[in-house]
Amino acid sequence: MKIDDINWKILKMLQENSRVALKDLAIEVGLSSPTVAERIQKMEDAGVIEKYSSDLNMDRIGYPLGVYISIKIRFGQVERFEKFIGSVPEICECHKLTGHDCMLMKGYVRDPKHLENLNARLAVYGELTTSLILNSILDKKVYAGPF
């Protein structure tokens, strides 16, 4: 699918606010609402737009500590770990890596004791390295055009 300058503007606005009104998108890109709706539908059909989501303020819902946890999984445990990790409510991302560690996870916990409990459940599968997120310098970058 061709992503032209107009589609990039639409994508930028949808990333910034997935609930932006169609009429506002149309005004911004200089097209009619039906034309913008058609472009969005084509990008959805092509898989360029996969989903619409809401960002949660984890601190305000009681999970103020963000963590990154990398794991070097024990031999023979990768498949079991991949099945297990989807059932861990504190983990919101898990990525398979190259290099020393096998996986990198991002999650949220209530307090240090909660983190200790999470680490104990994960350590069954391998060696962990846990880092607390102090502050986010860049979070949810909006992609606004070709690199």
Image (cartoon, grey):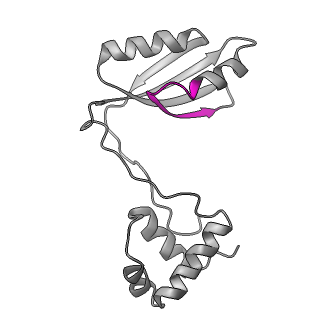
Q: Which residue sits at x=24%, y=38%?
A: 60
Q: Quadrant of the N terminus?
A: bottom right
Q: Which residue sits at x=44%, y=16%?
A: 118
Q: Say left or right for 102 vs 76.
A: left
Residue 99 versus residue 135 in the image, above or below: above
Q: Which residue sits at x=43%, y=51%?
A: 140
- Residue 18: x and y in percent read 42, 64
**Taking the image as drawn, is residue 101 in sight?**
no
Residue 96 versus residue 122 in the image, above or below: below
Q: Which residue sits at x=70%, y=14%?
A: 77
Image quadrant in which you'd find residue 16: bottom left
View extreme (left): residue: 60
View extreme (right): residue: 76
Magenta residues (range): 85-96
Which of the two residues, 88 or 73, is positioned nearer the viewer here? 88
Q: Magenta includes 91?
A: yes
- Residue 40: x and y in percent read 56, 74
- Residue 122: x and y in percent read 53, 15
Residue 114 versus residue 15 in the image, above or below: above
Q: Magenta includes 73?
A: no
**Taking the image as drawn, is residue 95 in sight?**
yes
